[in-house]
Image (cartoon, rainbow, N blue to C red):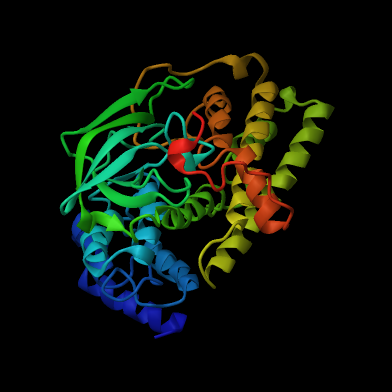
Amino acid sequence: MTDAAELRRRIQEFLSAYPPADTGRLDFLRARFDAGLAWVHFPEGLGGLGLPRSLQTVVDAELEATGAPDNDPRRIGIGLGMAAPTILRYGTREQKRRFLKPLWTGEEVWCQLFSEPGAGSDLAALGTRAVREGEHWVVNGQKVWTSSAHLARWAILIARTDPDVPKHRGITYFVCDMTDPGVEVRPLRQITGEAEFNEVFLTGVRIPDAHRLGEVGDGWRVAQTTLNNERVAIGGMRLPREGGMIGPVSRTWRERPELRTHDLHQRLLRLWVEAEVARLAGERLRQQLVAGQPGPEGAGMKLAFARLNQEISGLEVELRGEEGLLYDDWTMRRPELVDFTGRDAGYRYLRSKGNSIEGGTSEVLLNIVAERVLGLPAEPRTDKDLAWKDLAR
């Protein structure tokens, strides 16, 4: 089955067996996964049909037209956009069958335990240690800026398993059980007043070797799959015209003519065009993904996403004048997702400051674009051949 017409027929058969109006949400999602209509480019038996990635839009459109429930992708974005592609590529058969279905249905939320207080931009310098004891690994360390850790059942984790080799070579990739008694999650309150991020302390956490992804010491290569998919998920999300941050400021411009000035008009026009260019570039990137794994191009998209969000939100605050200085709610809370368009201009302005940090800092992404897209010489690295244990800290 390779064409859209045959796929639509299969979708209609599925809908006849599981009418959305008469089927519970979770039962519907589980049945959709089993029918291969979760992500059609995944293999059969793992939520897919082994079809081209481009046919996923056919499935999504057909089901949306019937009012079928979705899996709340914004709430489980880390699992969908980062954990699942990594598990698919590096996981064992048992790992794929255990984790992918509840991940996709949203029954199990995932988080990412990568960044550390001393290893953010230089992620390969991480110091969280995993020591093997028989068929388990004992993990000790601290992670930080972990979205959804307070909700997560599982985490993708990288830890140092060999301190005697250069930093990129002594890392191993694991799936960590967030219910382990050695896992402690503490909220990090942000400038917005919310605590969507967390710091996570790992004390004697025991991870079975069966939950290792990839070979021992090969975690950096495995992590690149996660990071490339993360940048595509952040910067290359599908949006309609005037979707995202440019939408609210455009509506304010149309509805509030008394706020307009010539200077603001020129800035809005420039940012509107840049937002549309970024949106179309995202469409092109998704078409490239049909042909294979995401590459460094996602870094460019994520760069554009961060810069545009910050410039557009700044313009919106200026356009609204005194209203732009108001803030709706400083209540400390731990949200399930980031809602850029559902809050006021002040929230968008403050929250967008984090866009140039999360998912890889803009400075690091500029290096990636320079070296891996433009082919420019790499920056000198004096620690390239030093053992991790000998690095200055």
Asked whether, in this view, residue 241 is left or right of residue 54, the answer is right
Q: Quadrant of the N terminus?
A: bottom left
Asked whether, in this view, residue 57 is left or right of residue 134, the answer is right
| Residue visible at 60% across and 15% down in the picture | 325
| Residue visible at 53% across and 53% down in the picture | 232
Q: Position of residue 227 (x, y in %)?
A: 48, 51
212 relative to 367, above or below: below
152 relative to 64, above or below: above
| Residue visible at 30% across and 51% down in the picture | 174
Residue situated in front as seen by the camera: 149 or 169: 169
> Can residue 213 be seen by looking at this rendering?
yes
Asked whether, in this view, residue 377 is left or right of residue 262, the answer is left
> Can residue 304 be seen by looking at this rendering?
no
Q: Position of residue 357 (x, y in %)?
A: 55, 34
159 relative to 290, above or below: above
> Image quarter for residue 195?
top left
